[in-house]
Amino acid sequence: MFNDTISAISTAKGKGGVAMIRISGADALSILKRVFLPFGKGECPFEPRKCYYGRIIRDGVSIDDVTATYFKAPASYTGEDVCEICCHGGLYVTQAVLEVVLSNGARMANAGEFTRRAYINGKLTLTRAEAVGLVIDATNDAQLRLSASLQRGTLTKKLDALKGEYLDLIARAYVVVDYPDEELPRLERDEMRERLEKILFELEKLKTSHRASRAVCEGITTAIVGRPNAGKSSLYNALSGEDLAIVTDIAGTTRDVIEHSVSVGDVTLRLFDTAGIRETLDTVEKIGVDRAKQKLDEAELVLCVFDASEAENDEDALILSLAQDKSAIAIINKTDAERGMSEAFEKQIKEKISRVIYMSVRDGQGLDELARTLAQMYALDEISLSNDAVILGARQASSVSLALEKTSEAMALLRIGESPDIVCFALEEALASIEQIDARGISEQIVDQIFSRFCVGK
Amino acid sequence: MRNKTRIAVVGAGHAGIEAALASARMGLDTILFTMSLDAIANLPCNPSIGGTAKGHLVYEIDALGGQMGKSADLVTLQARTLNLGKGAAVHSKRIQADRLKYRSIMKGVLESTPNLRIIQAEIVDLETRLEGDLRKIVALITRLGERYEVDCAILCTGTYLNGTVHTGNICYASGPDSLMSATFLTDALRREGVSMMRFKTGTPARIHADSIDYSKLEIQLGDEGALPFSWQTDEDEYAKIPQIPCYIAYTNARTHQIITENIKRSALYSGNIHGTGPRYCPSIEDKIVRFADKPRHQLFVEPMGSDTKEIYLQGFSTSMPIDVQTEMVHSLEGFENAQIMRYAYAIEYDCTDPQELLPTLEYKKISGLYGAGQFNGTSGYEEAGAQGLVAGINASLKLLGREPLILPRSSSYIGTLIDDLVTKGTNEPYRMMTSRSEYRLLLRQDNADYRLTPIGREVGLVGDAQWEHYLLKREMVEREIERTRHTVIRPSEELNEMLRALETSEITVPTPLYDLLKRPQLDYENLAKFDTSRPEIKKSLLFVAQTEIKYEGYVKKQMLEVARNERLEQKPLPQDLDYTQIQGLRIEAQQKLNKVKPLTLGQASRISGVSPADISVLLIYLEH
């Protein structure tokens, strides 16, 4: 059996009604149990080949309503334990589900890997048509990646530079190993540490760029909350006004997730139906705080609107307590009117929500600051979308994260004084994850690098 | 019938010796053909055995039941472990060998091996017969017209096949060390459909020791208490061998000027040589041309033996005419009056395209015919010995009707070497390097027997004595590791002072010896004073225990990687598959796959030009 559990989006890339994420490996079911919360009461039995309806949860927040099916080994496509999650087919939501699965212990599947496992486990019983379809899928994936990186020449260049840096470091370390008698400059620990720090910096930046590109392209799910008349509707209208145009209208949806996508500066916000939350809060005593919290928790970002002209009440306090552990911005509205809010409560707001903007929505004051704050939160001030290398896809983000992890590991090994053979092992893993190719290809590249760069041999 | 044998080995260099000994020791009637009985086990280039990754190969040969390590131990003039301080996985043993003594010891071993006949003869032709749809080797013909019927033949022709020696613009047919070249076999192989390639290598001048002014050179001494290659050598006795020093010399601006001015006169640059030379073993003129900004190059001054004054000048290989060579040598500090005894030369020779071989080293097209050593496009005594051993074992296993031995890459440098050769081919003489192995943390010198001795036992080459020695070693190492888990070192001012000095954290509570040994800064040596309950145990065993402790985590990680690839490695591909008939494979992949005919999907995935998508296509095709 293979030791690791893999996952990938198994349906065609792009918008579609429904998409399927497949997980295969010994941990498939335990990963599903971690990310999938079934509707309904009682323990979910996860009987094989039965379809369950529920939600995918990320950090306690529901991302999408999905169906999940468990196939017990060997009665599955790959012959291993397999779980299939069917979610809504949007690019964003599909990737979000995949990312949750990946962050819960699955590894991104390589092209053709499900099929490879199916074959090796003696399970490949596809019709010829299905088989041909899979081939097309595998080839398309590679072509997709290729065309994407062609379009984003900066990313390719950046990755090439990183690869070059890794190769150079490894080759420098190994040339003195393979040619110990030559008069070659030793790669000193300090130099290695310095260069690793630079690599780590670049990788961090790439990782950040993924966050930024997501904020720009896919949007941040955002809830605007506040008690009635605090200025939610005005803010909502101001955000979807002429200057900050409505990007899309998601029409005819029966689901109460997203109403509008709006651009605030470069950041796209996907605004929630705040009415639901208001109603919930209105009936807070009847329905309970938990339900209100859960509703709020579906948002990645919460804009809490407080009315500066009124004295604070219980509802404000509740909103503040709900928002305090979240990624949130406090908007203290109506700063043009006479002051009603106590200084003590204002202090509380600042303590619980680090980002506070004073605003007069009616006059349009403070909207620019909101745009700036958002840009800062989503690293847009660190990343230049036109000039910097930007990561769009989950696959690349996943390899960059892995490279980051392995490079940090190499750094830690270096720090505790480990020998170069061990430090380089971690670096080769980092290189392999950047390359997204088999580690075997790499040893050849190192050998070539050694010969092209160094004068060695008897 | 005397003109009949089960296995014939052609060539008694390092590949031929291991091949012949393996098959004879496995009980098969064997003949070893050599063109000169006086040149058995010749070291025509550097008088040293081992080196980076090569040392690993020698340990692996020994672990499988081969001969090279044992003989090398007996002729050690100087022993060093390279890469101390760079991690135990890349520690590499190298010895300076007494060349003549090595030859006579190897000859003696061969002569006293049962089932083995040694015959001085040049093999000029071979006969094959069609059996089914495959040709099969049936006989070898000698220059004197004798015909030997064989079941298997292993070609280990080294640099002798159509050898041409170049010195400046003078070139002539010759093997190394002025021995005869073999001029007929290439044509016979071509006639049988074998593709041949032409490679080049070279060797530096030999100097009379008394003509060198050693006072101007840096001395290089061997290691004290060096460990032997072979399990058969007593390590305490080995440590007592008196060692001879080597010396280091340098090229200078004058040397470089002589070379630059005369570059057109070098056989390499005049267009006389057509063979491909190795990147890792360039001639001095190559180094000067390619790395013009390097002000000097290091040269090693090495003894050729204890009874000779011949000195080898490592790093100074050239194909310049002799007047330029003399000037070059005299330009070196300490060599102003040097007397050259043998001039440097480049040698071109014929070899086979290893992609025509199976991982057993048998020809895909000719059943029973094997290739090993430089004939397969490699370089180096150790690489040759490793392949000879595997070819000898596989020819024997075939005749015994047993499963072949294919060592996975994760098992050994030998497995990596052969997989690289037959899967990727080579366009220059292939040298083993630690950077060629993706499993190098697993493949250490000190655990070569852990990895390979059980395999050697299974094959039948590892005798009872070696097996018992191995089992005992394992037991003692395990017992010692167990002891370190239970032995607690108490914090003391003396210990903490040392820990501080070594820049590792102090201990405040009693700590298991095991945990301390895991720290990169600590080892058995510097902990000796604090490890009072340590039993009497051999240095080599302590080293294994220590390395096992230090590498445990990394070994586990690499083993996971091995396990991940294992099923793919073991999925067989049919040998009669015509890849051009598989729809969906890209044309490049079809051609590469048809050439290599990989045995497994794992091997297929390593062919350059075969993508993961192609592997998926193969998977799907195989299902139907």
Image (cartoon, coloured by chain):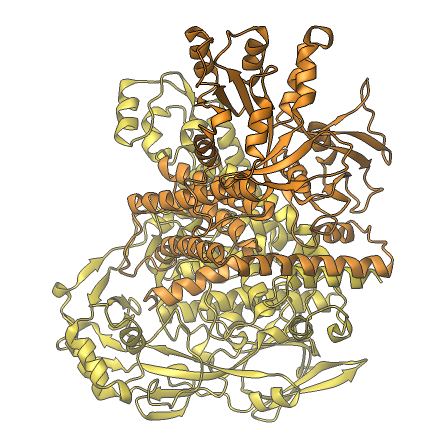
Quadrant location of the N terminus of chain A in the rendered image: top right
For the point 66% across and 87% down, which residue is it?
A: B192
Residue name at image x 53 percent, y 82 percent: B197
Does the image show residue A84?
yes
Q: Quadrant of residue B538?
A: top left
The image quarter containing residue B175 is bottom left
| Quadrant hosting residue B530 | top left
Q: Colour of chain B?
A: yellow
What letter labels the chain drawn in orange? A
Q: Percent from the top left, x then y, of residue A281?
A: 66, 13
In the figure, is residue B594 to the left or right of B506?
Answer: right
User: Which one is nearer the viewer's eye here, A402 or A214?
Assistant: A214
Horizontal relation, residue B385 to residue B241: left or right: right
Left or right of residue B600: residue B509: left
The one nearer the camera, A312 or B529, is A312
Residue A144 pos. (x, y %): 63, 58
Q: How many marks?
A: 0
Q: Residue B555: tell me if it is visible.
A: no
Indicate the position of residue B424 as horizontal and vertical percent values. 57, 69
> Is residue B555 positioned above or below B527 on the image?
below
The one of B44 and B406 positioned closer to us in this rendering: B406
Q: In the picture shown, does residue A163 fall above or below B106?
A: above
Which one is in front, A12 or B78? A12
> Quarter holding the C terminus of chain A?
bottom left
Q: In x, y percent, where is residue B315?
A: 29, 70
